[in-house]
Structures are given as C-alpha cells and as structure tokens.
Image (cartoon, helix red, strand yellow):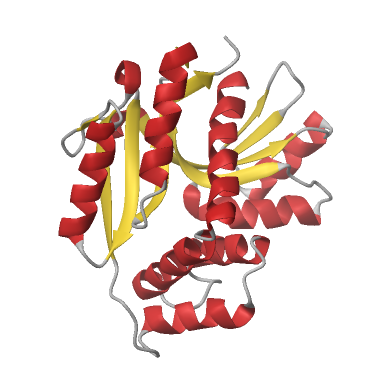
C-alpha cells in the first residue's frame, strides 16, 4: 500500500494547510452548494451532497452554515452561481496533475491556474491529456481489523474490492456513489476506518525524490493556494528523505 500511503500524505498535508489558512469552510460551502444545485437538497438521495456534508461535520462546520449552503444550492436563498472546471497538466518529471475548481469567474481562474503551473515548472495541458490515468473511486483504510470479517462485511455492504497490503493495511474500494453507504455499513458492523474519501486516483505513478520532489510539492502547494481550487490530484509519489 506504499503508493496509497504517499498519496494520502499529500492529501493530509493539504487538509492541514487548508485548516491553517482558514479556507476549508469556504471550499466545503462551495461543494455543498454545487452538490445541492445539481442533485437536490436531500442527502439521502444525493451521494455527493452526503459526502460533502460528512466532510463538513468532520471539519466542525456549524449546522447553520451547512443548511445555508444547501438552501443557496436549491434556490431557497440567493447565492453565487459557481461553475465547475477541471484543468489538466504536467508537473516535474512529467507527473500528471488534475486540478478541480469552482468559480464564478472562469477567466480569472484559468489565468491563475496557468500562472501557477508556469511559475513552478509545470505545464497546463489540454482537456483529456492526463485524465485517462485517473479513476474516480472511493476508498476506506483500516489498519487494525480482522481481514476475513472486514472483507465479508465490505462486500456485503456493496464494496467493489478489498485489498490487503504487506504492512497490514486493508483498503476497501467503492464506487463513488456508494462510499457513504459502505462506510456507514462498516461502522455499524464495528469497523472504524482510519482514512477515507472519494477521489481521482492515478493508475500509474511517477516517483520523485530530492529536489524534484521539493519542486513538485511547491507546484502542488501553489495550485492549492488558489482560492478557486477545490482539489489537486497527482500521479506523483514524493520521497523527501532521499
């Protein structure tokens, strides 16, 4: 599970940075608003909204903030009309990058993303140039669980796969829309995950070490610092201790 762990570390670094910058609420509110607009305000029938709300609770967002975002998305309150954009490109060593944005000003967003790429040694590519290397999936990570019991419970709950790794970590893979229900079913069965999310996951990784790893992290940080950026996904696996 080495590749996943390194990838997860990047995501966790992002989450910590977001919290430090005070931007995590803003990003969650955007996601909740758009999810509600596209799929309705009932999380029971809108998996994307349910996932966004779960993340909001994890971040200790007040319930009033969540409800206002839903109301704006469903049109019950006036709000900004965000559009979703995805940019693709290449980083250090040809590592793939996908950048998901929500914005009310496409011209500003594409200029900011292009500037972050070019200033930090990357190249903004064309639509589809790296998307083929990523798969949309949910995952849950368990570090101390009975493998047979977890596998039985996970598959019964609707998981797509259960992967055991040499370091004892067990990973449950789900379809994006099934992630929340699989997580809830496993929790009800007594299994508590240490990590999990719905993500775009690289199928082929690019190993980077030393200066290249530092440069790639700088590029990722520059993209994540942009106000309109929601998520950055990469095929890069960074080794800072080499």
Q: Quadrant of residue 203?
A: top left
In the rendered structure, the answer to whether residue 18 lies left or right of residue 228 reads: right
User: Visible in this render: residue 65?
Assistant: yes
Query: On the picture, is 194 further left or further right than 53?
Result: right
* Residue lying at 33% horizontally and 16% vertically, measured from the top left: 93
In-front residue for pair 80/172: 80
Give the percent coordinates (x, y) of residue 192. 78, 47
User: Residue 133 location in percent, x, y?
Assistant: 34, 28
Q: Does residue 15 appear left or right of residue 208 in this picture?
A: right
Left or right of 149 in this view: 121 = left
Residue 132, horizontal then vertical, whole percent: 29, 30
Q: Residue furthest top?
A: 242
Q: Check the picture and name the quadrant holding the N terminus.
A: top right
* Quadrant in which residue 227 is drawn: bottom left
Pick out the residue farthest to the bottom: 76
Q: Tell me which residue sits at (74%, 19%) in the image.
A: 167
Where's residue 183, x and y in %? 67, 52
């Amino acid at each position: 599970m080495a590749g996943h762990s390194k990838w997860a570390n990047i995501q966790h670094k992002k989450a910590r940075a977001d919290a430090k910058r005070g931007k995590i609420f803003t990003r969650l509110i955007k996601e909740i608003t758009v999810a509600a607009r596209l799929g309705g305000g009932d999380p029971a029938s809108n998996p994307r909204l349910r996932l966004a709300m779960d993340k909001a609770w994890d971040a200790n967002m007040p319930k009033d903030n969540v409800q206002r975002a839903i109301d704006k998305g469903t049109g019950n309150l006036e709000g900004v009309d965000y559009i979703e954009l995805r940019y693709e490109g290449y980083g250090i060593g040809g590592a793939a990058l996908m950048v998901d944005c929500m914005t009310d000003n496409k011209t500003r967003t594409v200029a900011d993303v292009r500037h972050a790429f070019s200033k930090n040694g990357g190249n903004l590519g064309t639509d589809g140039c790296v998307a083929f290397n990523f798969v949309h999936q949910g995952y849950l990570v368990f570090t101390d669980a009975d493998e047979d019991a977890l596998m039985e419970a996970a598959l019964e709950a609707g998981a797509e796969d259960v992967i055991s790794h040499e370091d004892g970590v067990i990973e449950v893979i789900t379809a994006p829309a099934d992630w929340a229900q699989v997580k809830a079913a496993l929790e009800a069965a007594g299994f508590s995950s240490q990590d999990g999310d719905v993500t775009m996951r690289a199928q082929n990784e690019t190993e980077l070490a030393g200066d290249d790893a530092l440069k790639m992290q700088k590029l990722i940080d520059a993209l994540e610092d942009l106000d309109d950026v929601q998520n950055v996904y990469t095929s890069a696996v960074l080794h800072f201790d080499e």
